[in-house]
Amino acid sequence: GWNDVSLHGSDQIMTPNIDIIGHKGIVIQNYYTDTQGTPSRSAMLTGKYPMRMGTQGESIGGAEDRGVPVSEKLLPSYLKDLGYATHLVGKWQLGKSRECFLPTYRGFDTFYGFLGSSIDYYTYNRVEVNMLNNTLIIFVSDNGAAATGMNENFGSNVPLRGTKGTPWEGAVRSTALIWHNRMRSHVWKGLFHVTDWMPTLISAAKGKITDPIDGIDQWHAMINDEEALRTEMIIAVDDLKGWGALRDGEFKIVIGNIEQCCSEYYGEELSKLRNEEPLYEKALLDSETATVFREVLNTTLNINKAFKKRSLCIISKPKNKINNTQLCMPTNELTLRFRNLWLEIQPRRPPSFDIRANPSFHDYIWYPWLDGDEPVPVPLTNTPRYPLQVSTEEFNYYVETKLKIMKESLNDCVKSLTDKFVDGMSRLF
């Protein structure tokens, strides 16, 4: 969660190795991910909103026949086109019921990790390779902490509201750090969505995405500390639970009914139980990352700058504004726009679990259990019910929007026919 990284001001559990990546690199202060693992990962690797692919909502279950559509080209395939070798270590969770969903069929040369949502911890031997000067390091979280609910743990999203699996800030406002040895260190306050990673990283690799996606290339804006190219985004949608969230500038709208048990502020009471705070300065300087930077890159951490940067990364609660109704100007603009976007959802089927996936049938290994000839579930075509009733204003807005699109299409068609006619006539003389 947001408060699980000491860079954001928490002194309960120090994370100096993560913090130094931020202190020496770029902190993306307004980074938004999705609410669960599968939608976040699919958005990152495709550059598209999960709702366009049926990967929104709950993560793919261990025995569920679902994955990122094979028609989608993923980030590693674009990188291979640019001459890169691609390897994945760790968690996948984008489908494993069929071989065509596996990482090595989706653009990765090799894969070492686990296909589902979780696995037991294991130890490993660290391998050092002299490639730090030519490495781009990115640290992000795929969603907020589950401070309560079915997957409750000790994660903390303080001071943000809600938990993993909800559209509140505690689920989707996440840590994002990026480092390269030649990057200028700063806190970038531009708006960045998880879908932006694909075009941004391809741009960093001197490539360009021409396919239609939702992500925006923000590489130059980010490294040069310029204004963000993104001003709005669909934060998250769950058509089966019937809720969604949209942000436009400084405004955010949440529609639908969200579980009340996961919609509060959690964790602040724990801060009162801690003993003497550990020394942040000592934790940073004694960390393994600081040692590597000193010995390999011959660079040291400026503690004064680190404390100043840390202060810029702490979210403060607004004062004397929460109950000030004079600041509110009623408007239905976001509701109208969200309803229009809701029509673009690729509906998700209610999860069903296949007994054939049981690892006991496959030498106790989670592995694809369906053959290539097995029929793929037909996508649903009915648009899921929008959580809000239609008002007269919304109906008029929808009609006007469709008429505008029709008018633009007709104008383009007429212009094209006119140009062809003029060109044909000119050839006669």
Image (cartoon, grey):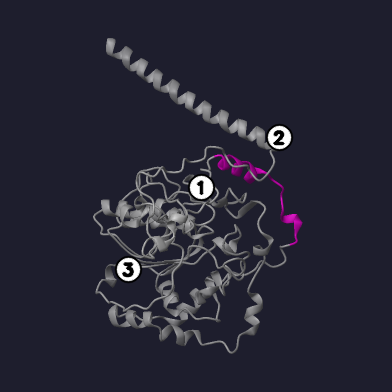
**Which of the two residues, 77 or 378, is positioned nearer the viewer here?**
378
Amino acid type, residue under disc 2 in the picture: Thr
Which of label 2 and label 3 is nearer to you? 2
Which numbered dot is residue 182? Answer: 3
Which span of residues is magenta-colored?
323-343
Residue occupying the point 46% across, 87% down: 282
The residues bearing labels 2 and 1 have C-alpha atoms spaced at a distance of 26 Å
Residue 429 can be seen, yes or no = no
Compared to residue 173, the image places residue 234 above or below, namely: above
Which numbered dot is residue 392? Answer: 2
Amino acid type, residue under disc 1 in the picture: Met
Residue 220: percent from left, percent from top: 38, 57
User: Which numbered disc, 1 or 3, marks the residue that appears first in the sequence?
Assistant: 1
Residue 409 can be seen, yes or no = yes
Identify the residue position indicated by label 1 in the image. Answer: 51
Residue at the extreme bottom: 276
User: Which numbered disc, 2 or 3, marks the residue that appears first in the sequence?
Assistant: 3
Number of residues whose C-alpha sits closer than 10 Å to that of mark 1, classed few (under 14), some (14–19) or many (20 or more): many
The residues bearing labels 2 and 3 have C-alpha atoms spaced at a distance of 55 Å
